[in-house]
Structures are given as C-alpha cells and as structure tokens.
Image (spheres, rainbow, N blue to C red):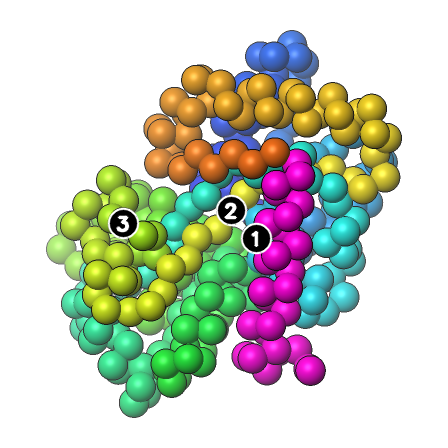
Amino acid sequence: MPFAAGDALDQSARVIADQMEDELDVSVVIQNIAGAGGAVGTAEAVQAEPDGYTLLMGSTGALTARPLMADSGYKTDDFQPLAQLVEVPIGLAVAKDSEWEDVDQLFAAAEDERITYSTPGPGTTQHINMGQFALENGLNLSHIGGKGGTGAVTNVLTGEVDFVFVGATNYLGHLDGEDDEGLRVLGVGSEERVDYLPDTPTFQEAGHDLTAAVWFGLLTHSEVPEERVAFLEELISKVAQSEETRDAYAKFNLQDSFLDADAFQERIDGNVELHRQILTDMGVLEN
C-alpha cells in the first residue's frame, strides 16, 4: 500500500483485505510504504517474489505517470492488473481562515500572483490534473508534494500551502473545527455533487472545465504464473463485488468502480498515453 494509513487508498485496501481474509481464512497483511507520491511503495512491490502472494494497491499517477517522469525503480508493465476497485473524485480545499470563499476567487488570484498547493506527490493524478488546468488557464501555481493525501492536507492546515487538491474523502475529518480551524472545500471534480459534501459545488457548476478523479486497483507482478493470476482474478472479482464490500465502500464514501483485469489494463494503457501528453505539455517531459 504505497501511501500512509488513513487516506482513501488505505481505506479501500483494508476493505478488500478484510473480505479476502474471510474468504480464504488466512491473514492478509497491509504494508504501508509511503513516499514520492506512491513511487516508493510501488517500487518495493516490484521487488517481491513473483509468486502471487504480494499484491500492489495501485493508484493512477504512481502507476502510469511516475515511470514516465524519472527512473522510479519500476515500469508500468512490471505489473499485471487484477481488478480496478474504486474511484474518488478530487476536491480542492483551503484552510477555514483563507481569504478565498470560492474557486472563482482563488483562480482569479492565481492569475496575478503565485499560489502554492499540495497533492499527494509529484506525478500523481492530482498533480497532473491541476498542472494541466493551470497551464490551460494561465494560473501561477507552485506545487509542493505532501507525502500522501494525509500529508497534503496537513500542509494546508499548517499554512505551508494555500490550497490542497486530493481525493475529496480525505477532507471529511477536518470540516467541523471550531472558529477558523479545519478546512473549507471549495469544489469537487465529479460530474455531480457528492453526497458527503452536499454544499460543495462541482467545478463545472462554478463554470470551470475541470473533472478529476483518482482510481485504485489491485495488481501483481507481471511474472506471476498464469494459474495463480487466474485464481487471484476470480477471488478479487468475488470479494470486490460482494454486498459486504459495497456496504463497506459506502461507509467510507468510496465509489464502487469495479473493472475486470482486461478492462483495467485498457484503462491503464489509456492513462499512460494521456499522462505522457499532459506531462509533455507541462514541460516535465521532452518531446
């Protein structure tokens, strides 16, 4: 699990692990290895024995963008997908004592002055989406990685950055602070408002062409034998689509977005090409 405990990726991993334990009657251990926007833990996973006993909880940017940006210790095709599990829309939040009351004010300010923001790390979906939006709209933004979603939220709470752009579920424990403590969520990247932030408009509602979500899914080493992969695909398909898992997803405000291995591979391939183009446009990659 290439991010710290407590954020949306960790929650979805624990939901699946619990169901796998019940199904197999064995222990399923979650190992949190955070760092570099998910790259450290992903690189650790590729070093595991390719026997099917080590699975990677992969996320969009760490799996499809980081290998394009630098020598991250792994390539996207070092892993084979088992199933996509969930999606979480990305939201933008500021500290409650921020001068900006809505995204219009914040984006207008970023046209005239440099604004800082935090995401789980360089090369994550959050970083790429906001970087592309800034490029297309002439915004002056400086990015600071947060060592995961929880770290990114901490950055805005402590005043290190002006706003945070992470999975919207990461904000739920920070909305009820007294006076100026906590966060104010200004927008979400979903097509429609989300139930757990009913008063927060989508970016589209606010007149901005920005939709963004991060997906999470399970993968294993590309050299795992076919018969073991087939077993894992069948197991994960069963537990991921069970009523118990869906109920647990709802408890954590995670959007069930199951894709089987073939459909997940197709999405991964598409994201690699999309991120290659966006990173080139941002000047991160050379033509």
Q: Which residues are magenta?
A: 261-287
Q: Type of residue at label 3?
A: Glu
Residue, disc 3: 192
**Mark 1 → mark 3, Cα distance in angstroms:** 21 Å
Measuring from the top left, give residue 1's x and y in whole percent: 61, 41
Measuring from the top left, give residue 199's x and y in whole percent: 16, 50
Q: Is residue 263 magenta?
A: yes
Measuring from the top left, give residue 166's x and y in whole percent: 41, 56
Question: Are discs 2 and 1 less than 8 Å apart at CB?
Answer: yes
Question: Which of the pair 229/147 is nearer the observer?
Answer: 229
Locate residue 70 relative to residue 17 in the image: left or right: right
Question: In the picture shown, does residue 268 fall above or below 220?
Answer: below
Mark sitting earlier along the chain (3/2): 3
Q: Nearer the viewer, mark 1 or mark 3?
A: 3
Question: Quick one: label 1, few (<14), some, or many (20+) residues within 10 Å?
Answer: many
Tag 1's secondary structure?
helix
